[in-house]
Amino acid sequence: MEPSDSTPSGTTGAGTAGAGAARSAATASGTPDAGTDRAGSPCFLSHVRVAFGDCDPANIVYFPNFYRWLDQATHELCEAAGYELTRVRRDLGWVGFPLAEAGARFHRPATINDSLRIETRVREWRRRMFLLDHRILRDDLLLVEGWQTRFIGVHLADQGGRLGAMVIPGQFLDAVNRQMT
């Protein structure tokens, strides 16, 4: 995939959309429908085992933990590509990989001791952003679909150190793409 030159406005902010807002914004932002299945396409795999503390009194995973696991999966992908967070901060002067947008659709619950598989795919490379799709599964049962829009954050010295999105280096793009199996 090649980066496109289109970059949405608001690329320097970070935030998340709630489940209801994510559903209504999903169609408008081009996020795949719940029926879209990319299971056969190459992805990066990570795994999570649900612990007691991940669950609410109803014995199901408290929904913010799914967002935490999607964040963790993205950082594991970047680390596997050679871009571990403390190294990029120290050696490259990057802030990291901030979120500009995130959302999820919750299809089924998970509970204590479930072994979950997270499939992460880069849906699109843009000049200053990369869009990720995630699927969380228990065995082959789809529990959650999530998406993120991220950028490589840097402090803009000419703007008083404000957080900004840098142009995505080709080496980063290539290294991440090589992790998709």
Image (cartoon, helix red, strand yellow):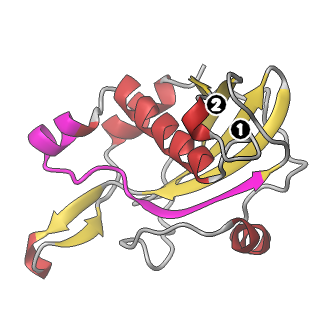
Q: Nearer the viewer, residue 41 or 64?
A: 64
Circle on res. 102 = none
Tell me, yes or no, whether the highlighted magenta stretch contains residue 163: no
Residue at numbered disc 1: 135
Left of 65 or right of it: where is 88? left
Left of 163 or right of it: where is 60? right
Location of residue 97 with respect to 16 vertically, above or below: above
Extreme residue toward the front, this view: 57
**Residue 80 picture quarter:** top left
Give the SS element for disc 2. strand
Location of residue 123 with respect to 181 vertically, above or below: below
Tell me, yes or no, whether the highlighted magenta stretch contains residue 96: yes
Is residue 1 shown to the viewer in this render? no
Circle on res. 118 = 2
Earlier in the chain: of badge 2 and badge 1, it is 2
Q: Are marks 2 and 1 in contact (CB under 8 Å)?
A: yes
Instruction: Specify the amino acid type for callout 1.
Output: Arg
* Residue 107, x across and y down, in percent: 85, 47
Left of 72 or right of it: where is 103? right
Image point (41%, 39%), residue name:
173
Location of residue 165 with respect to 87 vertically, above or below: below
Is residue 3 shown to the viewer in this render? yes
Image point (65%, 41%), residue name:
55
* Residue 37, x across and y down, in percent: 84, 39
Instruction: Specify the amino acid type for callout 2.
Output: Ile
Which residues make up the magenta segment? 86-105
Crowding near the residue tagged with mark 1, few <14, some 14–19, many ≥20 C-alpha atoms within 10 Å: many
Q: CA distance from mark 2 to mark 1?
A: 6 Å
Image point (35%, 38%), residue name:
172
Crowding near the residue tagged with mark 2, few <14, some 14–19, many ≥20 C-alpha atoms within 10 Å: many
Q: Quadrant of the N terminus?
A: top right
